[in-house]
Amino acid sequence: MICRVCDAQDLEPVIDLGEQPWCNHFLRPEQLGQEPFYPLRVVFCHRCGTAQLDYTVRKEVMFADHTYLSGVTRSLSEHFQRVALEVDRRFFAASPAKAVLDIGSNDGTQLQHFQALGWDVLGVESSTTTARLAQDRGVPTLHAFFNQATARQLGRAFHAINAAGVFFHLEELHSVAEGIRDCLHPNGVFVVQFLYMKRIVENGAFDQIYHEHLLYYNLRTLETLLNRHGLALFDAYLDPIHGGSMIAFASHSGQRAPSDRLGALLAAEDRDASNTATVYRQFARRIDAMKAENLDYLDRAKAAGQRLFGLGAPVKGNTLLNYFGIGTQYLDCLVEKNPLRRGLYSPGMHIPVLLESELTAPPDAYYVLAWNFKQEILANHRPLLERGVHFHFPVNPRDN
């Protein structure tokens, strides 16, 4: 293969998580054991420093329809509200009319916060179910994959373009980047919210590697991509959402001066050698140590007669479950809030998913797969903590 960002061919395999199912392919009972498995490997580009998958599951398989909903988690909705307020007040407070485009807009949660501030909004969402949910909530949504052809069909400019948790999904990466440039107002701002690979490594959050995430950006590598398409970063900051996400701001090249805090973040990447193969080789060794530690915990808990449930059925949790080999021999079920996953089974390990509201009794311990919402989970389950129910976090994100 060639590098997805810079077209170089000097790619080194650095992390191999084996053959895994597409981790958002939650199964109906009649589908058990029928799902395909694909290689899940990270390679490192020695020219531009980008970590990326070497195998692509087609976007029509992963994104034509799925069960992920942005609006289920209060923490994420509150984060989206903060982003909308920042964009509005910081860049466009004096604009009488302003329009925002959200790429991969899901159920419209981000755009609803822009609507509340008086923006003209449009979402582009490839998933049939979530696009319909957004439309039903009064969020104008085009059911399509966004790329340059889609941008040309829109035929308009937007003051702000948002991509939250989707810019690392892109099979048509360069066509999408060209489409963003074409749709961005001359003085517009592109807000790209992405899992920050430097923090993924620091957290040991290898479960955030899965087939939907084709690319794993640091700021240096994102900068390489944007510069190729006439766009440039001018600011960024690290936010605790999802265990450590970068909120980065870009404009047309030469339009806005880079901030000091962007410079400081880039300098930190250079200082810590974050864009080197050595970092990823070390990460691979740490992942295997985490596997041994987690299986030891689960074996001890089961030997003590404890009943264990998984808490949350996030897509990333399936990477962890499949690589660690955690199935119903350890976890009776996965407990979820998302009604779209009710009655389904996790891909690969085939653990049944139950809704939290349906439980009649708690387990002795929860194995928390939705670890990125740790504080919200602990606050919501304080009565269970007081009753002695243990919450085990296989990944413990550091504070920002």
Image: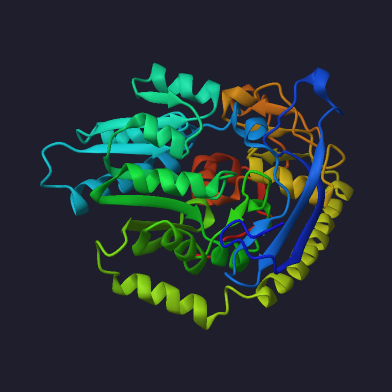
* Residue at the spot 58% in from the left edge and 23% down from the top edge: 339
Residue placed furthest toward the bottom: 271
Its colouring scheme is rainbow
Q: In x, y percent, where is residue 187? A: 22, 52
* Residue at the spot 40% in from the left edge and 16% down from the top edge: 136
**Rendering quarter of residue 44:** bottom right
Q: In x, y percent, where is residue 310? A: 70, 40
Q: In x, y percent, where is residue 255? A: 24, 61
Q: Decide if residue 366 is in sight here.
A: no
- Observer-nearest of 80 and 106: 106
Q: In x, y percent, where is residue 240? A: 46, 57
Q: Locate residue 135 relative to residue 379 in the image: left or right.
A: left
Position of the N terminus by quadrant: bottom right
The number of callouts visible is: 0
**Rendering quarter of residue 248:** bottom left
* Residue at the spot 38% in from the left edge and 34% down from the top edge: 152
Residue 323, above or below 359: below
* Residue at the spot 40% in from the left edge and 19% down from the top edge: 135
Residue 396, above or below 145: below
- Observer-nearest of 360 and 90: 90
Q: Locate residue 133 relative to residue 367 in the image: left or right.
A: left
Q: Locate residue 158 relative to residue 174 in the image: left or right.
A: left
Q: Decide if residue 8 is in sight here.
A: yes
